[in-house]
Image (spheres, rainbow, N blue to C red):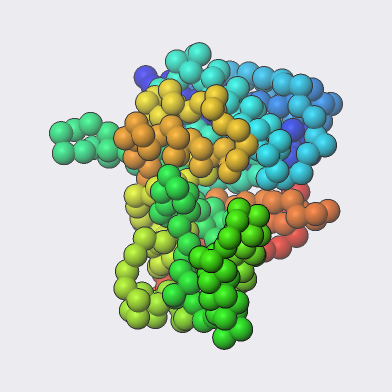
Amino acid sequence: MNMISIVTAATKSYLYAWGGLIRAISVAASHHDEVHFIFSTDHSDESKKAEEYAKGILPEGWKVTVIRLPIEEDLKNYKQEAQIRIAQLQGAAFAFARRIKSDFCWSVESDTIPPANALRVLEWTLSMPDAIGNPYYSVAAGTYPNGLFLGGFGSHTQHIYEDFNESERIIKPRLKLLLEKNEDRLKSARNAKIADKEIKRKGRLREWVKKSPPDGNIWQVTAKYGWRKRGWMDYAYPGIGLGAVVPSDWCGLGCTLLNKHALALADFSSYSGHGTQDLHLCYKRWKPAGIRIACVPHIVADHIKRKGNEIIHHVAWHDLNENHYGHLRQRQQPFVPV
C-alpha cells in the first residue's frame, strides 16, 4: 500500500482557520487507514494547542509528527524574510516526508479549506497514464482564489504571464504619451544614472498600465487580439471548472498532491526569498526536471486570508446555474471560526 503524508505549516498568527482545516483534512483523507500527518510550526503555546486539537480530531491510527523551528513573527507578508520563513517551514515538512519514504505527499496550507473529495480526485489525477503507461502528471493542484483562481501559464523569466498585455488594454492618451516619452528618454540616455532613473519611471508607468481596463471581456479580447497563454486560471481557461483537469505551468501549495518524484525535488536550498516559494519549486525544481503540473479546477478550496487587522474568507464554489454550470465562482465575507 502507498505511504501518504499530509503536510501543513503555520506559525501562531496563522492558526485562525486551524479547526476547519483539520476537520476538512480528516474527512478528505478518511479513505486512508494509515496516514502520517506532519505539522511544521514554531515553539508558541498556540501551536502546542493546535497540535493537541489535531490529535483529538484526526482519525485514530494516523501518525502525527510536529516539527518546531525557532521562527520569529516580526515580519511582513510577502517580504523577502517572510517568504524565507515559509520556505523553511514547508521545506522541513517535505524533508520529513522524504525521510519516512512517502509515496505521495499532500500539501495543505493552513489558510485553505479543501473540499471533502479533494484528495481522492488529486490521487486519481496522478494516476492518469501517458502513452506508455507511466504517470503523466507528478503534481496535481486543486485551485483556490487569491484575487483570481490559481493556475495558468508562465515561464522561467515571467512566472505568471500578464492576463492582458498593454496592447489589449484601454490606455488613456496621457499615459500613452508618458510611455512614449519615457521610451525616447531611455533610448537617448547619456549615462547610467539617467538610464536608471528612466527604468524606475518605466516600472511605475507599467503599474498604471496594469490598472487600465482590458479592451472587453476575455472572450472579446481573444476574438480581437487572438488566443495566447495567460497567467491566471480565470483567463487562461475561461469557463473551466467542474469536471476539468488542465495542464498548468505553475501552482500554489495550498491543496497540492506530489508524487515521489516531485517530492524528491521539493527542496528550497537555493531559494533567496525573491518571488514566492511555491513558484520557486515550479520553475527551479520541477520544470527543469520535466515534471508536469495538473491544475484541477474540479477541486476548489476556500482561502482564508489576513488583510491588515481583518481576516477575510474567500468562499469558492462551482456555479450551478444552467448557462454557466460548473464555472468557478468566489465571494468574500468576514471569517467566522466555527
Q: Is residue 223 above or below residue 62?
A: below
> Percent position (x, y) of residue 160?
48, 53
Which residue is painted at 67% across and 20% down in the image? 66
Q: Is residue 320 above or below residue 11?
A: below
Depth order, front residue of 199/77: 199
> Percent position (x, y) of residue 41?
71, 27
Does 77 sit left or right of 118 as displayed? right
Which residue is painted at 48% across and 72% down in the image? 166
Q: Is residue 178 visible?
A: yes
Depth order, front residue of 67/242: 67
Farthest residue to the bottom: give it.
173
Q: Quadrant of residue 289?
A: top left
Does 65 sit left or right of 298 as displayed? right
Does 118 sit left or right of 44 as displayed? left
Q: Quadrant of residue 82?
A: top right
> Percent position (x, y) of residue 269?
55, 24
Q: Quadrant of residue 59?
A: top right
Question: Quadrant location of the N terminus?
Answer: top left
Does 167 sit left or right of 38 as displayed? left
Farthest residue to the front: give it.
190
Which residue is painted at 70% across and 43% down in the image? 79
Depth order, front residue of 264/188: 188
Which residue is painted at 74% across and 38% down in the image? 15
